Amino acid sequence: MRWNLPNALTWLRMLAIPLLVAVYLLPGDDASMNTRNLVGTSIFVAAAVTDWFDGWLARRLGQTSAFGAFLDPVADKLLVCAALVLLLDLNRVDALVSVVIIGREIAISALREWMAGMGARTSVAVHSIGKLKTVAQLVAIPMLLYHQPLFGVVPIHEIGTWLIYVAALLTLWSMFYYLRQAWPHLRDSS
């Protein structure tokens, strides 16, 4: 593994996960929940921004690597899944939404790994539907983490709830898209 700035940002994103969880799970009173919401949202947003920034830097600096290509989506999935479990624990997201999103991440990751073993990984390469799903998740989750009305009037939690449902629908759509792309290989291999 080559040590470079893009890979370091990916590692930082992974290290942000236990910090995010600790913000909400360490002992404290209800009065500190507003502070926890702000700090937790800030950690998540900073980590999500590194998702875009590390890829941009890797391409710009010519520092792409097989290890970075492997680690980056792992870090993304861990961040989203940890945030969803945390939101579930805080009663801010529906269990079905969490199961759909986390289940899809596991299923498609396994499908990509299996397809790579067959030499057909490009059949399930990232598509614009998957990217749109990611954007919806990365906008909805901070809203649900922040939870309270923005400036006392903008219903952030309600907007985030609608967006996470949109993300869940896009999650299912993208999963069916990837399965349809892989189906000829799956059919021929059985």
Image: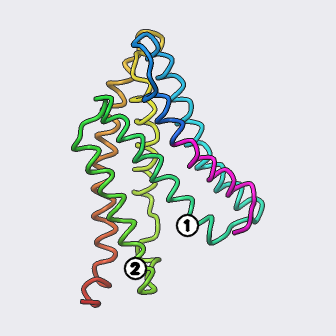
Q: In percent of the image, x 69 and y 56: which residue is there?
A: 6
Find out whether residue 10 is within the magenta segment. yes
Q: In percent of the image, x 60 and y 42: which residue is there?
A: 49
Q: Residue furthest left?
A: 96
Q: Secondary structure at mark 1?
A: helix
Q: Residue furthest right?
A: 61
- In the rendered view, tell whether residue 74 sits above or below residue 111: above
Measured as percent of width and height from the top left, residue 105 is found at: 36, 58
Q: How is the image coloured?
A: rainbow
Mark 2 crowdedness (10 Å alpha carbons): few <14, some 14-19, many ≥20: some
Mark 1 crowdedness (10 Å alpha carbons): few <14, some 14-19, many ≥20: few
Which picture quadrant has residue 176? bottom left
Residue, disc 1:
70
- In 3D space, how far apart are the residues under numbered discs 2 and 1 (Cα atoms)? 15 Å
Residue, disc 2:
115
Give the number of the disc on residue 185: none
* Segment colored magenta: 1-17
Would residue 67 appear left or right of 102 to someone viewing this image? right
User: What type is the residue that disc 2 sits on?
Assistant: Met
Which picture quadrant has residue 114? bottom left
Q: In percent of the image, x 47 and y 77: which residue is there?
A: 122
